[in-house]
Image (cartoon, grey):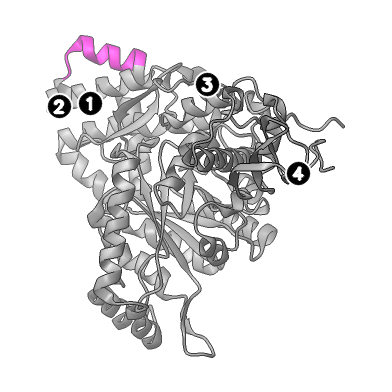
């Protein structure tokens, strides 16, 4: 008798018994005909006719086994970085201890806080698996350099490179700084790069070795050694490339079923061009829209070597955002996400996907974009629009907002401040970006007087998760431990994969067995 009361050679014909057999993922299951009736068991009894078999399907078997070895994890599961430290040390450490790879949300963090967070992870996890986000910052390249410097100082072995549209010296420096030859002469990369992309041309940059011009520049500056520059030709820039589909925050809203196969074909083409064995294989992951076991199973069925979750982690106990935001997220539906202007690329009209339900942020951000497009500067705003802006959106005068903005620019971007003094349109954009930047901070801290302005990055995966978790221990925010979310999404995906194997043989299980069930926590 195994735990849970399912005897291995007992043939179960009722839906509950069949579900228990299917849920024991570590054991094979068989559809058999015995005694004139059809049922399911783990070990066919003597004389039974085996109609179909599905092998053991523990969640560890999903994806690519060598992904587990390369990153030192138990599951092919990764939690992507959430900006502003929302995926902070608590969340990263919890998933690392559960055998998953999680990314510290470094984007937007002051240097002192990022330094402290990496020191905490190094102290608590040692050589355990974790990563740090490295955000492409074309307007402020020093930010990339700071993140790489801190990762090297704290011996961070993996970074998630996100939002890159072109390669920069810093992401190349990080990769090359860990290259060496082992005793056998093989090239080893101590620093792993996981690139998150939504375009084929960007993916190709990471699938190939670092460009020679960038490598030569780093060598000339003495930032990499001669050996590292030579070894750069023998490894792709990234160990893994994540196909980012429709997600929270910045997103191109690509369908995963289109993007992932396209990147798989690209990976195969690059490998053929370099020849068999010339470069280590690059793993291919899936992100965006993964909020239920069905979506996770579909990603693996599409060929993903690993999966990456985002929005669902923001609503967990360990996420460093406010309890009030977690409550909003726990009530979100699939259709409750909208697009709104982005703070970092406001003037270009770039948008981010955010939670629409329970906040006025999307409408107010949209107002700012309209005012920016229609007027040449703050001085041109009609009196009624100015009052609306100051009373309902900024909740302070434009003069006060500019003073706050100028103080920040003086310390961080003095060149922007100089430009703004002579460019009214640019000054207006910076004032509006003050609001757009502050709204995400107010959400993280749960600023009570600003609840209507909270900017919460979120994708439709959040609604999918809520629908699947309804009525289970994962429904309330207090029950959403990040490791439990990962475990049940993966077990549920393995369950759905097992059902797919049975369906492929013509077997149909009872409708009551179509869903993986999150078990109740053990009674103390």
Please tell me which of labels 3 and 2 falls first in the chain: 3
Using the numbered discs, state the Cα–Cα distance from disc 3 to disc 4 in whole angstroms: 51 Å
Instruction: Determine whether, in the image, residue 54 is placed left or right of residue 405.
Output: right
Please tell me which of labels 4 and 1 falls first in the chain: 4
Name the spot of residue 518 as percent of width and height, x first. Answer: 66, 31
Neighbour tally class for label 4: few under 14, some 14-19, many 20 plus, Cα within 10 Å: some
Using the numbered discs, state the Cα–Cα distance from disc 3 to disc 2 in whole angstroms: 32 Å
Callouts 1 and 3 close, C-beta under 8 Å? no
Callouts 1 and 2 close, C-beta under 8 Å? yes
The nearer-to-camera label among 3 and 4 is 4
Q: Quadrant of the C terminus?
A: top right
* Residue topped by disc 1: 369
Instruction: Determine whether, in the image, residue 436 is placed left or right of residue 449.
Output: left
Is residue 85 shown above or below 370? below
* Residue topped by disc 2: 373
Is residue 361 shown above or below 250? above
In what element is the residue under mark 3? Answer: helix
* Residue topped by disc 3: 328
The nearer-to-camera label among 4 and 2 is 4
Callouts 4 and 1 close, C-beta under 8 Å? no
Name the spot of residue 390 as percent of width and height, x first. Answer: 32, 17
Please tell me which of labels 3 and 4 falls first in the chain: 4
Query: Magenta part of the protein: which range?
Result: 381-392
Please tell me which of labels 4 and 2 falls first in the chain: 4
Per the image, is 277 magenta? Answer: no
Decide which of 310, 503 is in the foreground and name it.
503
* Residue topped by disc 4: 45
Please tell me which of labels 1 and 3 falls first in the chain: 3
Name the image quarter holding residue 355.
top left
Name the spot of residue 82 as percent of width and height, x first. Answer: 48, 43
Instruction: Determine whether, in the image, residue 200 is placed left or right of residue 489.
Output: left
């Amino acid at each position: 008798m195994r735990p849970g009361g399912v005897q291995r050679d007992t043939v179960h014909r009722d839906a509950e018994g069949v579900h228990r057999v299917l849920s024991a993922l570590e054991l094979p299951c068989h559809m058999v005909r015995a005694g004139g009736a059809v049922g399911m068991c783990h070990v066919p009894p003597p004389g039974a006719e085996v109609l179909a078999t599905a092998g053991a399907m523990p969640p560890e078997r999903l994806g690519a086994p060598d992904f587990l070895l390369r990153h030192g994890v138990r599951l092919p599961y990764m939690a992507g970085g959430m900006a502003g430290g929302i995926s902070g040390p608590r969340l990263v450490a919890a998933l690392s201890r559960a055998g998953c790879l999680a990314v510290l949300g470094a984007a937007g963090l002051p240097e002192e806080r990022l330094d402290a967070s990496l020191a905490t992870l190094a102290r608590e996890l040692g050589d355990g698996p974790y990563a740090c986000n490295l955000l492409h910052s074309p307007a402020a390249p020093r930010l990339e350099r700071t993140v790489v410097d801190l990762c090297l100082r704290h011996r961070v072995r993996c970074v998630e490179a996100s939002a890159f549209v072109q390669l920069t010296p810093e992401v190349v420096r990080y990769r090359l700084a860990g290259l060496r030859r082992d005793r056998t002469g093989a090239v080893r990369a101590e620093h792993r790069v996981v690139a998150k992309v939504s375009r084929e041309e960007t993916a190709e940059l990471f699938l190939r070795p670092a460009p020679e011009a960038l490598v030569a520049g780093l060598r000339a500056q003495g930032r990499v050694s001669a050996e590292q520059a030579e070894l750069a030709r023998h490894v792709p820039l990234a160990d893994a490339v994540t196909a980012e589909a429709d997600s929270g925050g910045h997103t191109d809203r690509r369908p995963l079923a289109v993007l992932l196969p396209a990147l798989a074909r690209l990976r195969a083409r690059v490998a053929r061009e370099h020849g068999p064995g010339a470069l280590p294989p690059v793993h291919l992951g899936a992100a965006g829209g993964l909020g239920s076991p069905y979506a996770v199973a579909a990603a693996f069925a599409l060929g993903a070597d690993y999966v990456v979750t985002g929005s669902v982690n923001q609503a967990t106990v360990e996420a460093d955002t406010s309890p009030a935001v977690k409550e909003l997220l726990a009530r979100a539906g699939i259709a409750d996400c909208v697009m709104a202007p982005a703070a970092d690329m406001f003037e270009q009209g770039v948008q981010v996907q955010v939670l629409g339900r329970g906040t006025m942020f999307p409408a107010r951000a949209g107002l700012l974009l309209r005012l920016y497009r229609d007027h040449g500067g703050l001085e041109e705003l009609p009196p009624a629009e100015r009052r609306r802006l100051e009373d309902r959106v900024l909740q302070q005068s434009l003069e006060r907002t500019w003073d706050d903005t100028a103080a920040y620019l003086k310390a961080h971007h003095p060149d922007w401040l100089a430009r703004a003094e002579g460019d009214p349109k640019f000054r207006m954009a910076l004032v509006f970006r003050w609001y757009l930047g502050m709204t995400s901070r107010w959400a993280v801290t749960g600023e009570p007087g600003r609840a209507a302005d909270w900017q919460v990055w979120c994708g439709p995966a959040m609604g999918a998760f809520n629908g699947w978790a309804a009525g289970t221990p994962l429904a309330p925010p207090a029950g959403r431990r990040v490791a439990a979310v990962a475990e049940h999404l993966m077990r549920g995906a393995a369950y759905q994969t097992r059902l797919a194997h049975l369906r492929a043989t013509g077997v149909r299980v009872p409708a009551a067995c179509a869903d993986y069930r999150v078990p109740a926590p053990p009674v103390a």
